[in-house]
Image: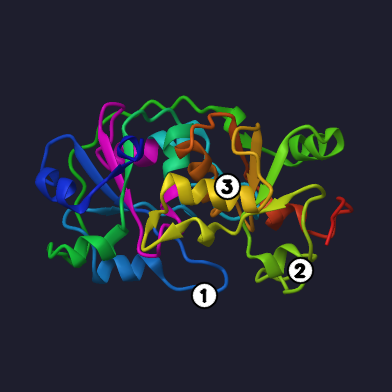
Amino acid sequence: MYNDYFVTPQWLNSHLFDDNIIVLDASSPPPTAPYDCRQQYLEEHIPNAQFFHQDEIADKSCDLPHMLPSADVFSQAVSAMGIGNDTQVIIYSQNNLFSSPRAWWTFTTMGCKNVKILAGGIDAWKAAGFDVQSGEVTPPAAKQFHAIRKDSNALNQEHMLDIVNQGKIQIIDARAEPRFLAKAPEPRPGLRMGHIPGSKNVPWDLLVEKGEFKSPEQLKAIFTKQGVDIHAPSVMTCGSGMTAAVVLMALTLLGNQNVRLYDGSWAQWGQDNGLPIES
């Protein structure tokens, strides 16, 4: 099943200059160790790769980070990158699968049928001995991408409050355990400490190793240890909706298609807004 969602560096190297391939660096920095991902991209990227800026190609009508864009905003942005509805999109990141699943989730939520992730990211590409390039990349000729946004993939605060009150859908929090247990402060200022009531904690980095997901058997064991039913309808949350997509994708790899993401995540829920929390 992993082959349905990932390509190897060897495969990408063989197909890098195919007419229907577009490669995107979708790196975003963690709030705990921010850095300039676009500058890093300019210094070193896979040949012909374009930078997919997840904080810019987003809903910027609110102050929450990298919220899912409208269908129009997404369509215009990726069309200008030479991406059409039939284009094969390959996503990678600079930082151990931290941000590429979020971009994968965005593309699939917008109706893209042909999107995969480079297993191991740019580190695996370089380790395989393949070339990198620096500087800007000129996009190919624009195409027309017509997004069909699946709004049910992305839950808002009202949806989440209903889920908490009803207690029938599994909530999984991808943040590190100290943050989940209110033993470490949030990296974003002004947020309360704790977690959404009833949540289970699966820190995203437990699921990955060297830019790839661990084996299905390892993933199942981790979820079981954290008290997660891998087959149950689930909604994922984290600090800002970024690493929630890592957990969502892991469950997808294990065959669970009833998975959704709380887009605002703790950046929204953790504000001083009277919403219930546990610690």
- Neighbour tally class for label 2: few under 14, some 14-19, many 20 plus, Cα within 10 Å: few
Kindly identify which residue carries mark 2: 190
Q: Which residues are magenta?
A: 76-101
Q: Amino acid at mark 1?
A: Ala
Label for residue 33? 1
Q: Which mark is residue 67?
A: 3
Q: Secondary structure at mark 1?
A: loop
Q: Residue at x 38, y 41 (%)?
A: 77
Left or right: residue 39 versus residue 197 is left
Number of callouts: 3
Identify residue type, mark 3: Met
Disc 3, SS:
loop
Residue 161 picture location, percent across and down: 81, 39
- Whether residue 234 sits left or right of residue 162 in the image: it is left
Q: Position of residue 63 (x, y in %)?
A: 65, 55
Callout 1: 10 Å neighbours few (<14), some, many (20+)? few
Residue 77 position (above or below residue 145): below
Label 2 element class: loop
